[in-house]
Amino acid sequence: MGLFELSSALVLGGSLNETNNGVSAEASSVQCKLQGTLRPPAFSADGDYIIGGVFSMHLYMHTVKHNYTALPDVDSRELRFSRAMIFAIEEINNSPELLPGITLGYQIYDSCASVPGTIKVAFQLTNGLDVVFHPSDNCSQSGMVLAIIGDSGSTLSISISRLGLLSLQQYPSFFRTIPSDRFQADALAKLVKHFGWTWIGAVRSDSDYGNNGMASFLDAARKEGICVEYSESFYRAHPRSRVRRVADVIRRSTAVVIVAFLATGEMKLLLEELEKEPSPPRQWIGSETWVTDPQMLRFSFCAGAIGFGIQQSVIPGLREFLLDLPPSKVAASTLLTEFWEDSFNCRLAESEKMVLIFYINIYKSVCDGSEDLQKLQSPYTDTSQLRVTNMVYKAVYALAHAIHSAVCQETNFTTQCEKLTKLESKQILTHLKKVNFSQNGYDVSFDANGDPVATYELVNWQKSETGNLEMVTVGHYDASLPVGQEFRLSSNITWMEGRTRVPVSVCSDSCLPGTRKVLQKGKPSCCYDCLPCPEGEISNQTDSNDCFPCPSEFWPNSERNTCLLKPVEFLSYNDILGIILAAFSVGGACLAIITAAVFFSHRASPIVRANNSELSFLLLFSLTLCFLCSLTFIGAPSDWSCMLRHTAFGITFVLCISCVLGKTIVVLMAFKATLPGSNVMKWFGPPQQRMTVVSFTFIQVLICTIWLVLSPPFPMKNLNTYKEKIILECALGSAIGFWAVLGYIGLLAAFCFILAVLARKLPDNFNEAKLITFSMLIFCAVWITFIPAYVSSPGKLTVAVEIFAMLASSFGLILCIFAPKCFIILFQPEKNTKKNLMNKNES
């Protein structure tokens, strides 16, 4: 925004030869009747071309004429602005380079910081009324102004520029030497975003300046994702109760950061109200108007305030000009008289009082001439922070350059200027658009909208070594730079209460990765709760609105902020369970081999010969394979291991059960052969026994072959049993093939069990059918139990259950059938005789 704007008078009036209603007439033939009372200028000087000036040198417009009851309220800072305009004009007039032979004049008015007063003096300037200099009833072109500089406040400048509606276009010839409020509002929003403040309060002046500036800021803040807890407004003319209400809102609010788009007058009232009853610590973010005003530094509780200001500058010779106020010059100006009497608390002899300013002369002494401006501590004499003052200075030079382009020519390295009697504002407007020069190291130019390049200093209120607040430049902002590079910040920023850490101002703390935001009902988008991501989903960013699922082979970590590759699980030789099962498998195989060795070493003994030694050795071989077969189920599944484990299991167990079935049939046939006239054994001799085993085994081989050809088992990653890990297992391929293999084993086992039960009471001292019955009982019990356990066991436990069933049934067979025989062979050799085996039981 600009506290200072430069606007051409073209928007406010016609050319020198036309009136506002468009009727053309020569000025000398027009009789003007003045309406109302004209206001005299605060400062004026005649010249070839007149430049108007409007400044708020009083804060209020007083209308009571003769009730002198109040002290003067001259704004010494605004007085400095007006004097800087005079300095620039006199500097140009005294220079032989820019406008040689041309004299610039000026008429500078006091707007009293009011819109009505501003509009009145604007009309007075643009209508060309010269009665200020030469009171009469005649209107003449003498005293017409080419342009108006001012006002120092945006609200008042806008009120002047809007008079351009007379030409059916708003702001047709409005130029700024201070960047538009739109740029400052955008910069403030980016500043708030830069420091991570998403929950702020907003206070503005209830004027064009505050309302337009805050509207631009709120729009930019919304785009940056910033939420506003409250937005309050007031004007200095409002009742004090309005100011107290705004102060109470600030005290009760939860937002730590407050963006104040206020004019100096309103900000002063608000801080005075907060000073009575301090609010919790607040971080103030200020607009250029008040944050660079040295008079505001007296509010120490605002230490750490930060905001944008016009760049500081140096104007050579200005301070000397400001201090050059001899008594004669002071006495000649009512405004300077008020300033002098107010500053030194004395009364100038014969001083006149302005009719619009009413105050009582209460000064105790007459000024004696010892007053020294050099020692005066006042914004008027303070040239250490020349910001807006330089904008006034640049505005005057911009007009001078435009006039130069209109009336001057460069010939033979010299400048010659012609005094045009009909130089119009339109001509000045045309040349202003082309202005591009540098003054005291500062560039001056305007874009198509009449705006300069938006550059600011970032100003921070810091405590000095003496404990007083001072303005320190801590960064710069240049809107012409690429997005994201506009800021240049230093690290020596001081925050509220002298803190060095950036304050936090959020409605809700940031949601960490692994959570998501859920808006709180009825509150702005910056107010939310943080909920953990659902199972299987993550969020890997701060303040994530949603969680997203991990890929199928990944799973969230415990914090749910990243996806990790799921661990692959299978029954391996590294698992304790795998080691135990492998040990039992190898142990069982060794036990079968040892048993075979015992039988082989005692193959001529009656107990070995009596129990069909050929089938016994084949059974021991098949049991060895059954034990070793379980090893194929341990380890990572592969294409070959998946096909091998199920087919080897099916074939070896059928071979085993076929041998047991053959031994059972042999027992039955042997006892049948003892009956008179029976020759059964010749139908079931060794060839038939071998054929039986081969036939039963061949059927299982056929089943397995069909299974492997049509739909063989294959390794697969089971992603469904466990969400957090992958089970590497063998898919059956064809469930029918698997259950056919298992069913065939069960069928043989059941048949063998039935035959063994039938032969269990046959007379013999050592009836092998009893041992077969018991072994098959264990075998059937194990595999019947296996089915529900296999179906219900998850993951690698499925494989462990299958191995356990194989080992349990194998151990059941070898222990029940061969352990009693080995015990007799090794420990009771006296019973290993044909006589003992042939003895009948008494029962």
Image (cartoon, grey):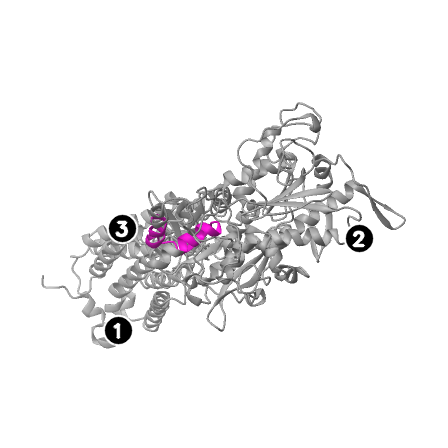
Magenta part of the protein: which range? 245-271
Residue 223 is one of the magenta-drawn residues: no
Please state, as top left, top right, bottom left or bottom right, where the C terminus lies in the image: bottom left
Q: Nearer the viewer, mark 3 or mark 2?
A: 2
Residue 344 % position (x, y): 51, 62
Q: Is residue 725 visible?
A: no
User: Residue 96: which numbered mark, if any?
Assistant: 2
Give me the residue at 67% from left, 39% from top: 145
Looking at the picture, tell me which residue is in the foreground, 597 or 345: 345
Q: Residue furthest top?
A: 23
Q: Residue at the left extreme? A: 843
Verify CB contact (< 8 Å) between mark 1 and mark 3. Answer: no
Q: Residues within 10 Å of mark 2 (few under 14, many from 20)?
A: few
Q: Is residue 224 left or right of residue 698?
A: right
What secondary structure is found at the residue carrying circle 3?
helix
Q: CA distance from mark 1 to mark 2?
A: 139 Å
Which residue is labeled 1 in the image? 825
**Image side of residue 775 versus residue 499, left or right:** left
Upstream in sequence: badge 3 or badge 2: 2
Measuring from the top left, give residue 469's x and y in whole percent: 48, 66
**Kind of residue at disc 3:** Pro
SS assignment at label 2:
loop
Bin the neighbour count of mark 3 within 10 Å (Cα to Cα): few under 14, some 14-19, many 20 and up: few
Position of residue 403 relative to residue 510, above or below, is: above
**Of the image marks 1 and 2, the number of the one nearer the N terminus:** 2
The Cα–Cα distance between marks 1 and 3, rounded to whole angstroms, is 40 Å
Farthest-out residue, right: 412
Q: Which mark is residue 788?
A: 3
